[in-house]
Amino acid sequence: MLAALYFFSIFLGAITGALDRADDQKWRADFEHMLGALDSLETLFAQTGSIAEQWRAKGIKGYVVLGTGPNYGTMVEGALKICEFSWRFGAGEELEDFAHGRFREVGGDDVLIILAPTPGTIEKTLDLLTGCYVSHTSSILLTAQAAPVLRKLATYLVEMPNLENEYLTPFAYVFPLWFLGYHLREKGELVGEKRHGLYAVDIHFAARFDENGDVIGQ
């Protein structure tokens, strides 16, 4: 779906005149470069597995995924999938909003997962990592901007492929989030198993209550 929207955008740009032939070719070449960069997925799978083991050993409970710009949707999808896979309570937040608001709620039992693919997100990321240092909050930083200061301040740094086109970074950055959720599952758990005696599809009002809110069958 995301790839279809990407190419549809190129098509619209071409027919409206917003993109010339050189622009069209560049955006298509950027996509091919991104596909080549996905050769790193095997390494990312292993690295996130190691992080998940350490996460579990530290007794970390909650998590927050932070993203902005083109990776706002990546953040939402990633937060949901980690929860769906691992049954751990978490949330997704816009990076800047979180820094000014809910950051004050996190502590040593939590982990921030920060998506920072471009230089434009690094300044705020450094502020967040400073806050993590003060609050003793663990951090997992996904970035292609692996400067020494980031390696020193982040609890875990996942080095991502360098994609100059920020609009293509969601294709790569969603995978480590999926992998983290997968690795955080306890042994024997399966995605979609019952919880609280219910499957997800069982959480349905009309199956349990009448129109007055009374339990059916009582």
Image: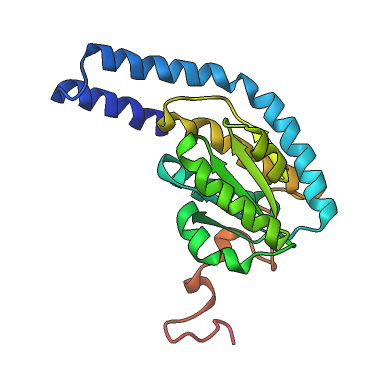
| Quadrant of the rendered image containing residue 144 | top right
Residue 83 image position (x, y, % from top left): 63, 54
Residue 121 image position (x, y, % from top left): 48, 42
Q: Residue at x 52, y 35 (%)?
A: 117
Q: Is residue 82 visible?
A: yes
Q: Is residue 80 visible?
A: no
> Would residue 54 be found to the left or right of residue 48 on screen?
right
| Numbered-mark total | 0
> Would residue 29 be found to the left or right of residue 170 on screen?
left
Residue 125 image position (x, y, % from top left): 55, 47
Q: Is residue 132 above or below residue 196?
A: above
Q: Is residue 66 above or below residue 122?
A: below
Q: Is residue 198 above or below residue 57?
A: below
Q: Quadrant of the N terminus?
A: top left
Q: Is residue 70 above or below residue 168?
A: below
Residue 136 image position (x, y, % from top left): 73, 59
Residues 152 and 117: in front is 152
Q: Quadrant of the C terminus?
A: bottom right
Residues 175 and 144: in front is 144
Q: Residue at x 46, y 59 (%)?
A: 97
Residue at the farthest left position: 16
Q: Look at the image and name its color scheme.
A: rainbow
> Would residue 177 be found to the left or right of residue 76 on screen?
right
Q: Residue at x 51, y 45 (%)?
A: 123
> Would residue 111 be found to the left or right of residue 7 on screen?
right
Q: Residue at x 54, y 24 (%)?
A: 162
